[in-house]
Amino acid sequence: MKLSRISKPIFSALIGPLLLLILGVAIWQVLGSGPQWLLFKENLHLVFTETQLLPFLLLVLLMPVNWLLEAYKWKLVLQGIQSVSIWTAFRATLSGVSFSVLLPNRVGDYLGRVIYLPTEKRATAVAVTMVASMSQLIWTIFFGLLAIIYLHSLLVTEFFLPSSFYILAGGVLFLLLLILLLLFFRISIVVVKLSTLINHPRFTSWIKGPQHLTQVQLLQLLGLSFIRYIIFLFQYGAALAAFMILLNPLDWIAGISFTFLVLSVVPNFAVADLGVRGFVSVGILGFFTMNKAGILLAVSMVWLVNLMLPAAMGALLLIGVQKFWKHVS
């Protein structure tokens, strides 16, 4: 159905504020109705003491660095498809977060980003964005596998599953990691094979984007994704320190890496994955400290700073987007 000339600017003006409103309600439903809100009210003052303020500031300051790196990754994979500035890539990345927190498994990330591109380039942009996401998943599985190895004896003892279960899980993850690396570094060959196998004009047009990615660009993607992963770990470490949880670095790194791995395989909505984050983090890190409330607060703080704040910023940035609605029909 074709939108009228009056309808288009109305939709264009309302999408950002409407998304922001939905996001605010969803956050309150998740945070305000759970134990986190009472914990925040009772313990938030701890963050602003002289000794705890520095870790909190580190958590907040690393957030834009994290998303700027993700924006640069997107700008990198778009080379050869559509030239975009780092500012446009940054805006698109944050808008992608806005959509992704409200849609399952962050599929909205692709929708939010491609709004900033011409209509004819969007399908191809989705394909290369998937390659960028693959580079991040590779590190999630790699560090998750190391976490399972490090936590093996603890997992066997505390979760009452046989050692063979974790050995099998580790073997599956290792095999998956090898397959992903093979596909990642042979993506141009894979694309050509798929285009030949599924000889359909629309599919060929959609999947052709990754063909232009060179080995150097793929290595750059992996490098940027590695830096992002380390930033994620630093942010969680800073949040734990802000709530006075000082653990052996290997313990909390393994615990958080295991949490990332679980989040990557469990279907969920990002706006509601705080429950999963809290459950897994408390379940693992709770074996190293009695301060389970502090763990839950730290995880909630990272969730707010790293996901909900960028999502709100992305929704506001959508207010200025006009190109998308010019092509709606």
Image (cartoon, rainbow, N blue to C red):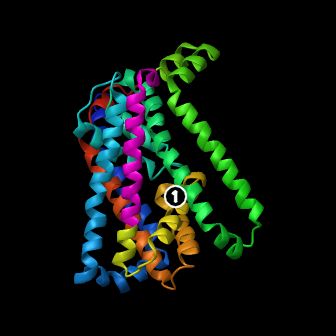
Residue 15 visible, this angle: no
The spot of residue 211 in percent (x, y) is 46, 21
Is most of the magenta stretch helix, strand or loop?
helix
Foreground pick, 103 / 196: 196
Count the labels in the image: 1
Q: Is residue 149 visible?
A: yes
* Rendered-image quadrant of the C terminus: top left
Identify the residue at image location x=37%, y=86%.
Answer: 42
As drawn, 200 above or below 259: above
Q: Can residue 29 be found in the magenta stretch? A: no
Residue sitting at 23 percent across and 33 percent down?
85
Asked if 95 appears above or below 258 in the picture, the reply is above
Q: Residue 309 occupies which quadrant of the picture?
A: bottom left
Left or right for 165, reference 187? right
Tag 1: Cα neighbours inside 10 Å, few (<14), some, or many (≥20)?
many
**What's under tag 1, amino acid-wise?**
Phe
Helix, strand or loop at disc 1? helix
179 or 206, which is in the foreground?
A: 179
Please name the residue shown 25% across and 76% down the image. Answer: 53
Left or right? Give the position of 133 relative to 90.
Answer: right
Q: Nearer the viewer, residue 7 or 316?
A: 316
Q: Residue 155 in the image: x percent, y percent?
A: 66, 70
Residue drawn at point x = 30 percent, y = 27 percent: 326
The region drawn magenta spans 209-236
Quadrant location of residue 262?
Answer: bottom right
Quadrant location of the N terminus in the rendered image? top left
Image height check: is 240 above or below 27?
below
Residue labelled with disc 1: 260
Q: From the top left corner, tell me how far across and down residue 150 is, in percent.
A: 59, 65
The reply, left or right, for residue 100 in relation to residue 54 is right
Check if residue 215 falls in the magenta segment.
yes
